[in-house]
Image (tube, rainbow, N blue to C red):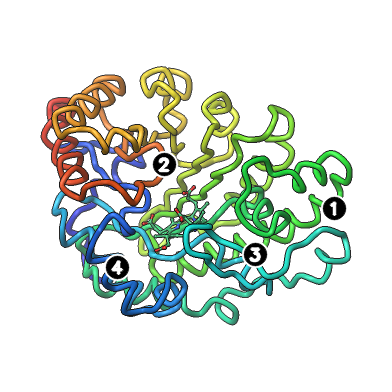
Amino acid sequence: MTELKNDRFLRALLRQPVDMTPVWMMRQAGRYLPEYRATRAQAGDFMGLCTNPELACEVTLQPLDRYPQLDAAILFSDILTIPDAMGLGLYFETGEGPRFKKSVHTAADIEALPIVDPHKDLPYVVDAVSTIRRELNGRVPLIGFTGSPWTLATYMVEGGSSKDYRRTKAMLYDQPEVLHLLLEKLAISVTDYLNAQIEAGAQAVQIFDSWGGALSYNAYQEFSLRYMQKIIDGLIKEREGRQIPVILFTKGGGQWLELMAETGATTLGLDWTTDIGQARARVGDKVSLQGNMDPAVLYASPEAIRREVATILKGFGNGSGHVFNLGHGVTPHVDPAHAGAFFEAVHELSAQYHQE
Ligand code: CP3
């Protein structure tokens, strides 16, 4: 294996000393980049990109080539590859977001779903990970990822994106055992999926619990956190002599950080509604933190972006244990120059917080 030339990201996740705060951005390969739109046009559509390891590798590397400050790469794929591999038929309607040809509503629907075997059912993802690792050639670490069982279940029950999770929540309160059956199947599939990514070369993994914040205090623990805990318990802990850090990101989960910190995750992802200094005080030495600038700050001027970066760095304070990121994915209308101003500001303004 080639030596890792920049391990700032992995070191910060593990709260080891760094020279400056590492930075990457959720959805860093995506529609705000003209080079991404060009490759996607060449592939035909988004799934054409995901299922072609060479093209998935190309778009993964695009933000790294444009922004030398980036301290991590993230596999180009989607969380919905798992329900697609279970046979639901994922497709994208322009401007409408993801849709499924089939959705699941009954115990019989769920019993008929297979457990996903990543090598057999999602070979294009495993191949993309090993291709990207090879092409990165040690530049920065590669992040693998998955959706949380709860977040994936909302898409599978609703048949696509949803604002109110109407059917999924009705199932949660009327037939909790049916929802548990689905979450259990997803947890097993997702554990195998992440382990396959780790074996193919992912050096850290992130669990996207994008819709966990829609749950009540009790329901979050029973229907989301519990299954993320199962996944973390089943993950490969070490590869190539290094620990594999796990980032747990529940959007809207700021009230539950203490509970999340008990799972054994290395790092908690924060959205922008939480104060990072208060979050640090609450979790102490248990976990590191990732986040948490409002993605909409990137619509503002480079001067405003710099001010927000400074505020968050100051809020976290001295020492390691912070990976800078947005509080959710970058949006398509962002000016690529503003993303560049963001990454530069993180490196320039953070060195002062890492002087012994
Ligand atoms: O972060 C990265 O750069 C890695 C790639 C990545 C994508 N999706 C690419 C993508 C990752 C990590 C995801 C995760 C994902 N996908 C999540 C969890 C993260 C989050 O944002 O909360 C969710 C909920 C999805 C489901 C999904 N996929 C949606 C809702 C959409 C439509 C988004 C939209 O704005 O239209 C997608 C499609 C998708 N996934 C795109 C990209 C770059 C856009 C597709 C395109 O090129 O048209």
Image-quadrant location for residue 350: top left
State how many labels appear.
4
Rounded to the nearest angstrom, the CA distance separating label 4 from label 2 is 19 Å
Q: Which mark is residue 59?
A: 4
- Residue at image position (74%, 38%) is 222
N-term mark: 1 or 4: 4
User: How many other residues sit within 10 Å of disc 1, few (<14), some (14-19) or many (≥20)?
Assistant: some
Left or right? Give the position of 127 relative to 156.
left
Rounded to the nearest angstrom, the CA distance separating label 2 from label 3 is 25 Å
Nearest the camera: 182 or 299? 299
Left or right? Give the position of 343 relative to 230.
left
Say which of marks 3 and 1 sits in front: 1
Callout 4 amino acid: Val
Residue 296 position, x and y percent, is 33, 35
Say which of marks 2 and 3 sits in front: 2
N-term mark: 4 or 2: 4
Q: Is residue 278 above or below residue 77?
A: above
Callout 1 amino acid: Val
User: How many other residues sit within 10 Å of disc 2, few (<14), some (14-19) or many (≥20)?
Assistant: many
User: How many other residues sit within 10 Å of disc 4, few (<14), some (14-19) or many (≥20)?
Assistant: many
Residue linked to disc 1: 178
Say which of marks 4 and 3 sits in front: 4
Rounded to the nearest angstrom, the CA distance separating label 4 from label 3 is 26 Å
Callout 2 amino acid: His
